[in-house]
Image (tube, grey):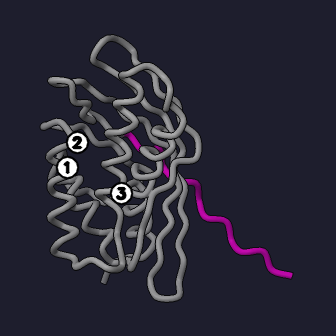
Amino acid sequence: MVDRRRLLQTLSWLVLLTAFGWVVYRSVWGGDPSERQIARTLEALLNDVAVRSDETPGRRDQRVQEAVARYFTDPVTLRHADLPKTGPGRRGLLIWARLLEQFDTAVINMRHSSVSVVEPGRARVKADFELEATKGDEAVTQRRSAELGLVQRDDVWKIESLEVAPGAAEQPEARP
């Protein structure tokens, strides 16, 4: 039996990553060419990891595997205190992504972000993300902050590190 709280925490990093890409894309449009290219990369990644209600799990898994190969370096460094121990690198990313499949839908929205090209061919993105997921009539929302390190390889930006801050303890619902 899967611990629901742990699963939600695991899923939150993927939602955060998806949201992050979208916000970065919107916030840097019109910035320097590297920032625009990073934004386009993250937007595509976030689209590829979303859970859609009209898609089979097999098709989504194929889409996520292709996205991990396309948008992440090998090896990739992952840090997230709330997620189950899945192992390092791309394999860990795939396991985290597959945990989202318990939901009917799941998207990551980026709320606040900053993109910094720290040197030619290297960039850092910091953002606040929000996972929005549904399962039946239940809606789930989780928030996280994350930092991504990107490297440019042959005019393509790839994520070489992902660090997701631990989530805040859930507050009990207010009672009258």
> Circle 3 — which element?
loop
The quadrant holding residue 108 is bottom left
Mark 2 = which residue? 71
Determine crowd level at label 1: few under 14, some 14-19, many 20+ residues with C-alpha closer than 10 A. Answer: many
Amino acid at circle 2: Tyr
Q: Position of residue 54 (x, y in %)?
A: 32, 80
Position of residue 20 measured from the top left corner of the image (x, y, whole percent): 46, 45
The residue wearing badge 1 is: 68
| Residue sitting at the far front | 30
Q: Earlier in the sequence, mark 1 or mark 3?
A: 1
Query: Which amino acid does the dot numbered 3 rest on?
Result: Leu
Is residue 61 toward the left or the right of residue 119 in the image? left
Q: Give the range drawn in magenta.
A: 163-176
- Confirm or deny contact between disc 1 and disc 2 (CB under 8 A): yes
Q: Nearer the viewer, residue 56 or 33?
A: 33
Q: Foreground: 32 or 4?
A: 32
| Residue count near mark 2 (Cα–Cα under 10 Å), binned few <14, some 14–19, many ≥20 | some
CA gap between label 3 and label 2 equals 21 Å
* In the displayed structure image, the side of residue 60 where residue 106 appears, left or right: right
Q: What element carries label 2?
A: helix
- Disc 1 versus disc 2: distance between alpha carbons? 6 Å
Q: Which residue lies furthest to the top in this view?
A: 119
Q: What kind of element bears circle 1?
A: helix
Label at residue 118: none
Disc 3 marks which residue? 83
**Among numbered discs 3 and 2, the one appearing first in the sequence:** 2
Instruction: Please identify, in this view, whether the residue under mark 3 or under mark 2 is nearer the observer.
Output: 2
Residue most extreme to the bottom: 136
Q: Residue at image x 36%, y 22%?
A: 34
